[in-house]
Amino acid sequence: MTPSTTLSADLFDRARRVIPSGVNSPVRAFGSVGGTPPFLTSAKGALLTDADGNEYVDLVGSWGPMILGHAHDGVVEAVREAAGRGLSFGAPQAGEVTLAEEVVRRIGPVEQLRLVNSGTEATMSALRVARAATGRDVVVKFAGCYHGHVDALLAEAGSGVATFAMPGSAGVTAATAKDTVVLPYGDREAVTSLFAERGGEIAAIITEAAPANMGVVPPLAEDGVGFNRFLADTAHAAGALLISDEVLTGFRASREGHYGVDGPRGTGEDWAPDLMTFGKVIGGGLPVGAFGGREDLMGLLAPAGPVYQAGTLSGNPLATAAGLATFAGLDDAAYETLGRASNALQQLVADALTAEGVPHVVQTAGTLFSVFFRGEPVRTYDDAKAQDTEAFTRFFHAMLEGGVYLPPSAFEAWFVSTAHTDEVLDRIAAVLPAAAKAAAR
Ligand code: PLP
């Protein structure tokens, strides 16, 4: 039976009168899949409840932060305790130091870290540092990678920009766009020839450590050299920097993020990005981003250096408490649980789609994964766009009707948490055959 969505529909009507498209972030509007987005009232563990009282197994996880599941007792208690001591100081506090220490301990290339309020702020600030450090303007990004809604980085971006098939965004000046060069992901020749031609103008390459905003597209090694290492080597040879965006992959792809997968600890290859960006998991569900890297680069920031960057709520005590409590839960056992849940779900989905003859490919980066509705591997944004988004839409709605909340876009990763127990996976497994049948139609 189709769940009732009357109260969500009423809220959506009210929302559309006072909020553009009724949402505060585009993909939430269900624009590409159609229908009424459930308005949520609560969440616990792997489960969501909407205004009409429907319950869903969550595979969005607030787009990444809820790695321990929703309303995790330790995180909620830490925030409650911090709230009792004051909501914001606009002055230094111990939680900021401990959170930065935790990141520096886990991520080799990060010697210093500054906290901001979103992933967008993190990439925007990292770009500013890179341009100041090199005295150059041009930034190289890859089609299908999303780095937040920074003017300079919206061209051919993933996430919502991909979901709505937008080439970029109106309102970005020609001068800003001119300093961004977009290349196909994974195309080493394109990178090499751009640097041969314009190396002296390039401040930085920015890349998702493993693209996950056009679906998951892992960086591939060629002749034993990983793509990220190749980018670092190419940038460095030209006096440019590599910014590795781990906002989504950070502390999810592995304990050390994707750098734990293709950095020295994962592959034995000796390379490092110059700057890295984080978000999502490090805030445990509250608004936090961070950028960090080598001390000489981070030392360029004001007040010691000439690069201005600031934030009224940056280093907020509630946000750092949530982040720290999340890190406290992210031990080796948690990553094992996450890896098991991720693998099991990938298998369940692949089996169900195979049984109905639905062309698909599951791609992974550490414990992160997504499902493309296309038979061949996806290596570029063009490949990702060539999937059968209509099959995805049918699959999506059948899953939703069966009580499983997937990302409402074929271009997004699916997020599991440590709360995705076998029992939760069984609930998903029960819905998959009908959803696969719907996709096959
Ligand atoms: N970078 C990456 C890789 C992301 O996935 C995102 C968001 O999904 C961002 C940056 C922007 O982060 P935020 O939405 O917190 O601004």
Image (spheres, grey):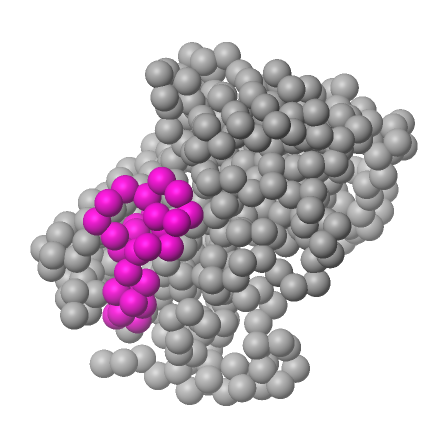
Residue 391 magenta = yes
Q: Is residue 339 magenta?
A: no
Q: In the rendered view, would you say 328 is above or below 287?
A: above
Q: Nearer the viewer, residue 253 or 79?
A: 253
- Residue 438: image quadrant is bottom left
Q: Name which residue lies at 21% across and 65% down.
A: 439
Number of labels in the image equals 0
How far across and down, in percent of the image, does residue 268 sit? 42, 12
Q: Residue at x 41, y 18 (%)?
A: 225
Q: In front: 319, or 134?
A: 134
Image position, residue 321 (x, y; %):
65, 43
- Residue drawn at 21 percent across, 49 percent down: 375
Question: Which quadrant is the N terminus positioned in?
Answer: bottom left
Q: Position of residue 440 (x, y in %)?
A: 16, 65
Which of the two residues, 39 or 242, is positioned nearer the viewer here? 242
Q: Which residues are magenta?
A: 370-399
Q: Residue at x 53, y 27 (%)?
A: 193
Quadrant for the C terminus in the image: bottom left
Q: Position of residue 104 (x, y in %)?
A: 63, 24
Q: Is residue 82 above or below residue 15?
A: above
Q: Relative to residue 214, is residue 12 drawn left or right?
A: right
Q: Is residue 365 visible?
A: yes
Quadrant of res 55: bottom left
On the question of residue 326 being in view, the answer is no
Left or right: where 80 falls relative to 440: right
